[in-house]
Image: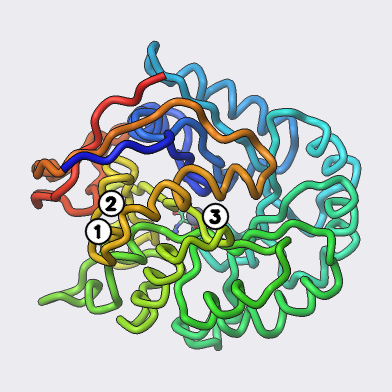
Amino acid sequence: MNITLTQPDDWHLHVRDGAEMASVIKFSAQQFRRAIIMPNLKPPVTTVGAALAYRDRILAALPGNASFTPLMTLYLTETTKSSELESAASCEHVHAVKYYPAGATTNAGAGVRKLANVYPLLEVMARAGLPLLIHGEDPNPGTDVFDREGIFIEHQLVPCVEHFPELKIILEHITTTGAVQYIESAPDTVAATITAHHLLLNRNAMFEQGLRPHHYCLPVLKREQHRKALLKAATSGSAKFFLGTDSAPHSATAKESACGCAGIFTAHAAMEFYAEAFEQADALDKLEGFASHFGADFYGLPRNTSTISILKEPWAVPGSYVFGKDRVIPFRADKHIPWKISASKA
Ligand code: NCD
Ligand code: ZN
């Protein structure tokens, strides 16, 4: 079997920087035409100048034949200036602003304590048409880790959406039935991305015969009933749900540690993983909308004209890939996976 799709885009991607970025960028460029690049570097990408410099480094690291466009984002802080957001809105290479709840995830220390603290900045973004990308988790250390998404939606997102009917908001990497229901009921200005790993795994995967650091990500994996709700949403044909891998490479050393980092690396076979999940739901015919149409439509960008093919042809994922000076352990390392992408066509 073989499916051909409009070339997809990844609406949520971490590629890191320097030698690590140079090791992983080729994987995304092989599959996707464009990707929204997360700004949680050290230090975070908080200005248009920093985003453009980061973009140049990504372009310089791409393989010569790659046709891949990094879509840059700014990292929102409580001290971001309105003028910076205005320049972001008028810069053709900056496409969104990312909200990290302070301390909620990797390099989120400079994030925002609560959405209400940045309402004046959201006002500027709403006026300028600049989308807000939200890591939707309550960062309070007392909040149960499995309840963080629900509490954030109820206490922070719902009032924010009501307050800013014009602001485009993407709730990223959703993980729960509650998030799916909220997105379905929200106005058309609100959409969500879904990762491949949240479509394929439930929280048991973190504890299979021992602690599995390579299945730890944020928001953390949830119960099977939530995975099923995500799969149903992704394969529903609703334009409110689209692809964002949240591929988040960390070195094997940083993951296999007494305090291991959150993040699952899926960029090496992202479309293969989505194809596997959609096939499970008997919904391969819904993959193209989710992967290649709805995200571009939401951002107001043209759909791609190139295509990719994905073949039903099992292959073995390597145990690791080079990652700067270390290695990264890919999702499904040392396992056979059922689908294989073939080269994209212009
Ligand atoms: C991401 C990372 O490592 O940058 N980690 C993750 O588990 N998804 C940060 C994020 O998106 O939360
Ligand atoms: Zn992320």
Q: Mark 2 points at which residue?
A: 275
Q: Quick check: marks 1 and 2 in contact, CB under 8 Å?
A: yes
Quadrant in the picture for residue 308: top left
On-image quarter of the C terminus: top left
Q: Would you say the beta carbon of the disc 3 residue lies within 8 angstroms of ligand 1?
A: yes
Of the two numbered discs 2 and 3 on the same chain, state the one appearing first in sequence.
Answer: 3
Pointers 2 and 3 in contact (CB under 8 A)?
no
The numbered disc on residue 107 is 3
Which one is in front in this view, the residue at disc 2 or the one at disc 3?
2
Which SS class for mark 1?
helix
Q: Between residues 43 and 225, which one lies in front from this camera angle?
A: 225
Q: What element carries label 2?
A: helix
**Residue type at tag 2:** Ala
What is the C-alpha distance between the residues marked 3 and 1? 35 Å
Taking the view exactly as shown, the residue that stands out farthest to the front is 285
Q: What residue type is labelled 1?
A: Glu
Q: Mark 1 points at which residue?
A: 279
Instruction: Say left or right for 8 vs 225.
Output: right
Q: Residue at x 86, y 72 (%)?
A: 163
Percent coordinates x, y for residue 80 in the rendering: 81, 50
Displayed quadrant of residue 199 = bottom left
Label 3 secondary element? loop
Q: Which of 136 and 79 is in front in this view?
A: 136
Quadrant placement of the N terminus? top left
Q: Which amino acid does label 3 sit on?
A: Asn
